[in-house]
Amino acid sequence: MDHCPAAPAPPGREEISAVLDCAGKQLSLDAPQVMGVLNVTPDSFSDGGDFVSTSAALDHARAMVAAGAAIIDIGGESTRPGADEVPETEELRRVIPIVEALSEALDVPVSVDTTKPGVMRRAAAAGAGLVNDVLALRAPGALETMAELEGVPVCLMHMQGTPRTMQRDPEYGDVVAEVHAFLGERIAACEAAGIGRERLLVDPGFGFGKHMNHNAALLCHLERFQDLGCPVLIGLSRKSFIGNILDLPPKERVSGSVAAAVLAAWKGARIVRAHDVAETVQALRVVDFVARHGAGDGTVQ
Ligand code: 7PJ
């Protein structure tokens, strides 16, 4: 398949499987996909408290799947800047019944946004098909736990600092090179622990210890992450990066978030984490059409 010059078939792309097996449910990465966000936290910045009960969570997840989400990401620990840590018992209480209900009810895989090995283990037992770890398996025991959870892929995200401190004064020499090097090191650590590259996704972690210009540079140069040989996942939906540019509150950042999703997909992101699923899915279908059919001179074949 030809691609436009701005979205080249990147080096190593052929090594990235077009389908990710998520504990038996298949996630196709032929075209950019949307990961629908389902926060089950009482304090999340954009939708905190909206989906705490299992039936409300299930309704919202079903609506996101109907709108085209290819995977649903369940988060029980808010990682917004300044957020306090949630004890494991509380995170389990929030997340596990919802992982169980959604894994049973939905055809698409369910992902769990957690940094805790105990939650990873219990979520996988409850049917989770992917672990999304903003600490990139740096918590004690996380690498070993994921090595044991054989059929479950994991997304490794970059963060400078901790959620409590990360936005105080993030500093980089060359943000793209440093985030790239970090992700390369975490891939190597996973492989050394017995987690094969075919089970890994990478994410530069927009907003996690990054100023506005750091986020802009990562988005502008996102294609550089292709050579890591893992699908790239990104999350920019409703984030302060968008809000600061537009001076709008989280629920009014839809168009800005969609614009960011389009830029990311054009630069090779295969999964876009988003709150506003229908809008993002439509935008990414347009991106995919142009990338597939627009590289030639427009002649109808
Ligand atoms: C991200 C995430 C992200 C991945 C959150 C929010 C904050 N996981 N979890 N990437 N963001 N992989 O939704 O704004 O960017 S929580």
Image: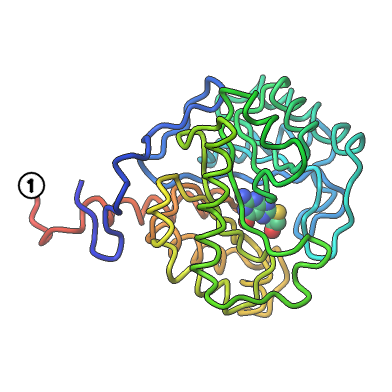
Question: Which residue: 57% across, 71% down?
Answer: 215
Would you identify the image quadrant in which residue 212 lies?
A: bottom right
Q: x%, y% of residue 59?
A: 71, 34
Image quarter for ligand 1: bottom right
For the question of whether residue 176 can be seen, the reply is: yes
Q: Is residue 11 left or right of residue 120?
A: left
Residue 21 vertical position relative to residue 154 in the rendered view, above or below: above
Q: x%, y% of residue 175?
A: 55, 72
Q: Is residue 251 left or right of residue 213?
A: right
For the question of whether residue 275 can be seen, the reply is: no
Question: Which residue: 54% across, 55% down?
Answer: 234
Nearer the observer, 56 or 131: 131
Would you identify the image quadrant in which residue 10 lies?
A: bottom left
Residue 169 vertical position relative to residue 271 in the rendered view, above or below: below
Residue 59 vertical position relative to residue 292 in the rendered view, above or below: above
Q: x%, y% of residue 219?
A: 49, 68
Question: Which residue: 84% across, 40% down?
Answer: 52
Q: x%, y% of residue 118?
A: 80, 31
Q: Where does label 1 land, which residue? A: 301
Under circle 1, the secondary element is loop
